[in-house]
Amino acid sequence: MKPVKLVTALFATLLTLPLHAADITPLHKVGGVLVDANGMTVYTFDKDKDGKSACTGPCAENWPAVKAGDAALTPPYGSITREDGSKQLTYKGKPLYTFVKDKKPGDKSGDKVKDVWHAVTE
């Protein structure tokens, strides 16, 4: 096959791939707990309601939002727009956070803090 025909055939094949081929799974499970790409535990906050983060100001300094990139997300993942305009990753509709006192991958020191923070265990 001539190089031009080969390139054309490859390009045509790429165009037929489903759009969801770019979907990502932003979290993975380690020891039954969902963690981010750096292996850090992610948490939900009981005071979040209706797909909106209630953790702002000093709260957000201690519980940074897990950022949602621009890649397509498939359920159970999604995103919300925070008050500052940034996108926050959600899991089953709940905004996700990390905890500043977790120092290394696998730490779960934020689990059950004040009975309102919970490590995501599916």
Image (tube, rainbow, N blue to C red):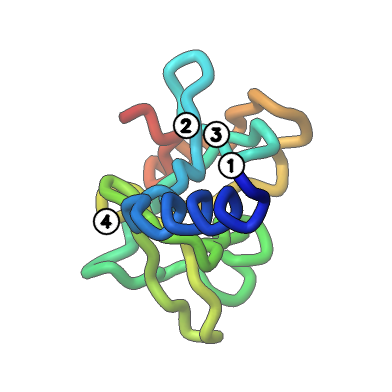
Disc 4: CA contacts within 10 A as few (<14), some (14-19) or many (>=20): some
The answer to whether the residues at label 1 and label 4 have Cβ atoms under 8 Å apart is no
**Label disc, if present, on residue 75 of the rendered structure:** none
Q: Secondary structure at mark 2?
A: strand
Q: Position of residue 111 (x, y in %)?
A: 49, 33
Q: Mark 4 is on which residue type?
A: Gly
Residue located beneath label 1 in the image: 1
**Residue found at the very far bottom of the displayed protein:** 84
* Residue 31 makes an appearance in the image: yes
Residue located beneath label 2 in the image: 34
Q: Nearer the viewer, mark 1 or mark 4?
A: 1
Residue located beneath label 4 in the image: 93
Please name the residue shown 28% across and 46% down the image.
76
Which tag, 3 or 4, sits closer to the chain's start? 3
**Label disc, if present, on residue 35 of the rendered structure:** 3
Question: Above or below — where is 45 with respect to 84?
Answer: above
Please name the residue shown 50% across and 38% down the image.
27
Q: CA distance from mark 2 to mark 4?
A: 15 Å
Q: Position of residue 62 (x, y in %)?
A: 65, 57
Disc 2: CA contacts within 10 A as few (<14), some (14-19) or many (>=20): many
